[in-house]
Amino acid sequence: MTKKMTWWKLLLWGGWTHRLSVLLSGIFLLQFTIWFGKEDGMWLAETVVIVQLALVVTAVFEHFPRLHWLVRGALELIAIVTINVQVLERYKVIDSMDLQSFFSSQLFLNLYELTPYLWFGLGAWVAYLTVIWFVEVKWRIYLLLIVSVLALCIRDSFSSIYLWPQVAAVVGCGLFLLILSHFSRLRRKDPEAWNRLADYPASIAVPVVSLISLTVFAGVLMPETGPLLTDPYTAWRQFRGEPVNFTTGKGIQVSASVDGYDSSSGYSRSDTMLGGGFQFDYTPVMTIDTTHRGYWRGESRSMYTGRGWDESDSERRGAWSAVRPDFAVTPDPRQAAGKVKTVEVVQTVTLLTDQRYPVLFGAYAMEKMVDINGAKSGFEPLQWNAPQSELRYSERQPYPKTYTVVSQMPVIDEEALRKLPLEASKPDMAEFLQLPDSLPERVRKLAADLTKDATNAYDKAKKLEQYLQTAYPYTNKPDLSKGRSRDFVDRFLFEIKEGYCDYYSSAMVVMARSLGLPARWVKGYASGTSAYEEEMLGMTMDEGLLDPDIGGLYTVRNSDAHSWVELYFAGYGWIPFEPTSGFVLPRAVPETEVAIDTSTVPATPPDSAETDGSLITGKHVGWGAAVLVLLAVLAYLARRFQLIDLIAEWARRRRAQLLKQKIIIECERLLRIFRRYGYVREEHETLREAVRRWTKQSKWMTAELDTILQQFEKAKYGKTDVTEEDWRQTAQSVEKLRSQM
């Protein structure tokens, strides 16, 4: 029984590193046969089959390393010749061949009949054996992996062939081969540890295979992102002013000029045809140093065509006015100045690209321009449109590199807005209630059903906003095959049922208008990311550590291009709404006003001005003498009981206690970092015991861990005080270990 188990163990696990290396090399080469098979006119179908079967039989025979290499090679050669004969006969390329003819004078004639297919099979065989030898060294694996991934990615980018699954498989094989190379090195340098590992290979193989397979599988399923850099071919075509074909989803190409439609995210120049999908482009566009987080508003549109948004007649004509530095622009005549409270927001915008825009961006509502490119001049290209709250910039002039703008962000008083009655629309609101006659009735019905329980305009708008945020998932690549309706909003709400900001915002504007609520569509940029948010990454707003509307320096990228909604409320003007799932609208909060209770303030007697001056002087002298006596008593007590020394000693101990707490916190941070990398402190272990165990595993961290342990025990158990230098030394050691992990 024991011999049988030993035999099976040797059969299954003997030389398992070599077997895995052979298997991974075969899967690696198989990806290239799949690539060549996808190329039109490159390989015939029978050639692909012969090469793939040659790889399979080579992999099978190479799994028996105990066979003499001459015997194994002869068997592989015979198998490859047999594969060629069988495949070519099935594809009717050659006539049927007898086995006996290969042992007669017809041998060379038969082999000649198999060419050139036989050369492909033999080439695959040689290539397989070469790769098995090549991946025995780690630097060769890196070289092979880099070259292969570059070749696949370049071909994928410049053709209609979809090769990302092959890229994922190549990367996965490369990672496994690197691990096997590490095991081979372990076998040479530490035979004892290798023998223990060889006795129980599943203990390490199962978690490693599971982890890498899960990583590669998750990478394949991840949504695609736009390129951070322009590829050389596109840059060359753009430099020559030639059209560029943007491929979306492989097989659907959109021909576009340099200034035309781009399949990556960014600020749109035309919104007349909405829909489709896009790639996320994370290229930084601008930085905005602001006193308050905001949405950086660009333009608004009021005419919905059923396909997208266009300018209305009034927007085309425009009520343009000049802009002067530090002078307030003409406010929107519909914006009521009396009821609306605002918060002043100062923004300095710095452009990071040479891209030009038709507008300058800023928080709503802009009040005045401060400077352009750091100067109080050069305002001639600027034109202000009060009804649209747009700051137009002539595209004939160089776009400014930096500018500063002041805005008055409206404070949303929800209680006051809920008290507004549902009034009939004013005549000048007609363009913001416009809807095409072709709008399907089910859109109007959905809006009415969602808001039937709301008793005021604000609650109706909130009902629409909340429904869109929760009922439809966000995606940058909606499944357009589900769409049948000719109307963009109807298609989103009832057929596609997923999308990005343009889908959500357009749907809310259309549904709000169907209820008689004046609304307009707005586009610009979302807030972007602040340095504070990146530093506090991982902390939630519930912890109170991250103010969602804090000011600071925000980096805005092409991926932050966004659209949202503004609804008009009589007496309060335009109020923004955010219907897109996953987005949070910046909110302005007024500064807290300190209320003064005047009832406690004594009234000034009417004849106070005529009060005798000597009486006032006497009161002052009396109070002054009392204060001096009190100070003298306090000074005597302080000296008698050494109060100053006691206070100083208390402050010193308090500071030492805080430093001890800081050191303990740094040690807890180290434990969290180590846990992520597999260095876990067991429940029964003290920190000293854990450190001793870790330093035996990894001697390179001994010096730093000893320093941290010494300071921790001094802070936790010692009676002596710790100093600033002790805390600084602990923090530096923790940071050094974190950077080296």
Image (cartoon, grey):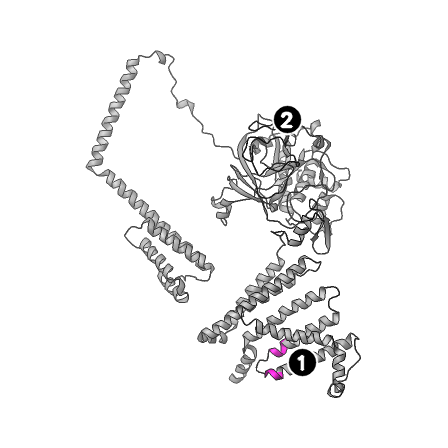
Q: Is residue 316 above or below residue 546?
A: above
Name which residue type carries label 1.
Leu
* SS at circle 2: loop
- Please rate how many residues cluster around mark 1, counting C-alpha atoms within 10 Å: few if below 14, some from 14 to 19, many from 20: some
Name which residue type carries label 2.
Pro
In this rendering, the label closer to the viewer, 1 or 2: 1
Residue at image location 67% in from the left, 59% down from the top: 156
Q: In the picture provided, is 697 more to the left or to the right than 582? A: left
- Read off the magenta span: 59-71
Q: Is residue 332 above or below residue 310?
A: above
Q: Which numbered marker is on residue 77?
A: 1
- Front residue of this view, candidates 292 and 33: 33
- Please rate how many residues cluster around mark 2, counting C-alpha atoms within 10 Å: few if below 14, some from 14 to 19, many from 20: few
Q: Which numbered marker is on residue 558?
A: none
Q: Is residue 447 above or below residue 22?
A: above
Q: Position of residue 318 (x, y in %)?
A: 69, 30
Sequence order check, earlier mark of 1 and 2: 1
How many numbered marks, from 0 up? 2
Does residue 653 show up magenta in the picture? no
Disc 2 target residue:
333
Residue at image location 74% in from the left, 72% down from the top: 46
Task: Work out whether residue 209 can be spotted.
Answer: no
Q: In the picture provided, is 408 more to the left or to the right than 685? A: right
Residue sitting at the far bottom: 104
Q: Position of residue 50 (x, y in %)?
A: 71, 74
- Front residue of this view, candidates 326 and 449: 326
Q: In the picture provided, is 143 more to the left or to the right than 603? A: right
Q: Position of residue 397 (x, y in %)?
A: 64, 36
Task: Work out whether residue 29 can be spotted.
Answer: yes
Q: CA distance from mark 1 to mark 2?
A: 88 Å
Q: Position of residue 293 (x, y in %)?
A: 54, 39
